Amino acid sequence: MNLKEIQQLIKFVAKSGVHEVKIESKDLKISVKTAATGNPVIYTEPNTLSQSPIDQSSIIDSSNDQLHNDESIEEDHLITIKSPIIGTFYRKPSPDKANFIENGDVISEGSVLCVIEAMKLFNEIESEYSGKIVKILVENASPVEFDQPLFLVDPS
């Protein structure tokens, strides 16, 4: 099973409502679990515990509002590249290397945009589109969720 097939399996599990899928073969063992409640899972740093309960819906709503408020660019023609997996987003292949892309860079289909580390595996995320990077929506070394917007691309 290659990376694309694993990503498709994760997408399928997330959309289907199934809570857990296990696949075992001679060479491979995969287990995909989702939150039983259907609510999004929010990862936080271990040292940032809150004393009061947090309403997750307000966090999600405020982040979506902030994304829309921050954009002064006409978004009708922009393409949003989203995370295919859950993990940690990195803009560089390693700490001593340059970023894969910057705002304003022109990319082509198949260009590596970032890596997402999931379970100690670093997955290169390639562009499915050609165009110009308008905005990078995620900070380096930040946790990302499945289907979270990562980049805005102007295809023209």
Image (cartoon, rainbow, N blue to C red):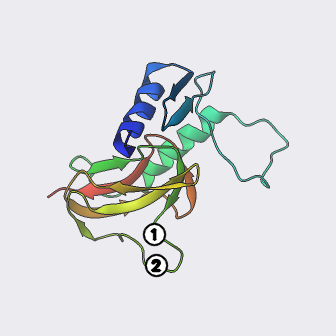
| Amino acid at circle 2 | Lys
* The furthest residue to the left: 156
**Residue 152, disc:** none
| Amino acid at circle 1 | Pro
Q: Residues within 10 Å of mark 2 (few under 14, many from 20)?
A: few
Q: Residues within 10 Å of mark 1 (few under 14, many from 20)?
A: some
Which residue is label 2 attached to?
A: 97
Q: Nearer the viewer, residue 42 or 98?
A: 98
Q: Nearer the viewer, residue 23 or 91?
A: 23
Q: Residue 3: image x %, image y %? A: 39, 45
Q: Residue 127: image x %, image y %? A: 28, 55
Which residue is label 1 attached to?
A: 93
SS assignment at label 2: loop
Q: Residue 135: image x %, image y %? A: 36, 62
User: In which quadrant of the rendered view does residue 32 lie?
Assistant: top right
Q: Residue at x 53, y 34 (%)?
A: 30
